[in-house]
Image: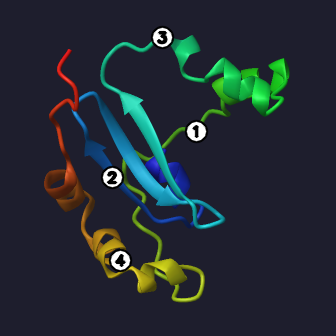
Amino acid sequence: MRDRIRSKGFHVFGPLDHGIMRSIYFSGPDNLSLEISTWVREVVPDAWIDPEVVKSLNISDEELARLKNPASYKGEGGAVAQPPVDPIKNRNLFENKKLKAVIEMSDKDVFEKLSTPNDPVAL
């Protein structure tokens, strides 16, 4: 997913190891902070999307099936580099020095320095 998002020109950092999951982070088209996570333990597929959210957003069965089965993407094995920082398109990077510093770190350094691999809750 990191390669796929970066190939569209968005900055992505991660993955970070959170013990129970690995996550990547990026800003969406409206500069909202977004996270995509993948569990490192078995997950019940039907638990991924809350039925109450589906109902409140009026998501049809067809749309829900599409969301659960996105178009395939071959990937590039983690080889897609961060896109260049554009001071106009990526204005928020220049306003947030910590975020800009993370974007400029290598993927290896991000993983090693920002991961928190201990489970937040002991089960």
x%, y% of residue 42?
A: 36, 13
In what element is the residue under mark 3? loop
Q: In the rendered structure, which disc, 3 or 4, sits on the residue that comes first in sequence?
A: 3
Q: Comparing marks 3 and 2, which lies closer to the viewer?
A: 3
- Between residue 85 and residue 93, name the one nearer to us: 93
Q: Amino acid at mark 4?
A: Lys
In the image, residue 113 above or below residue 94:
above
Q: Which residue is mark 1?
A: 73
Alpha-carbon span between mark 4 and mark 1: 28 Å
- Between residue 73 and residue 16, name the one nearer to us: 16
Residue in the picture at 41% in, 67% down: 82
Residue in the picture at 58% in, 67% down: 31
Look at the numbered discs 2 and 4 and tell me whether their residues touch, using CB distance below 8 Å: no
Q: Which residue is mark 2?
A: 14
In what element is the residue under mark 2? strand
* Res. 30 visible in picture: yes
Q: Comparing marks 1 and 2, which lies closer to the viewer?
A: 2
Look at the numbered discs 3 and 4 and tell me whether their residues touch, using CB distance below 8 Å: no
Q: Which residue is mark 3?
A: 44
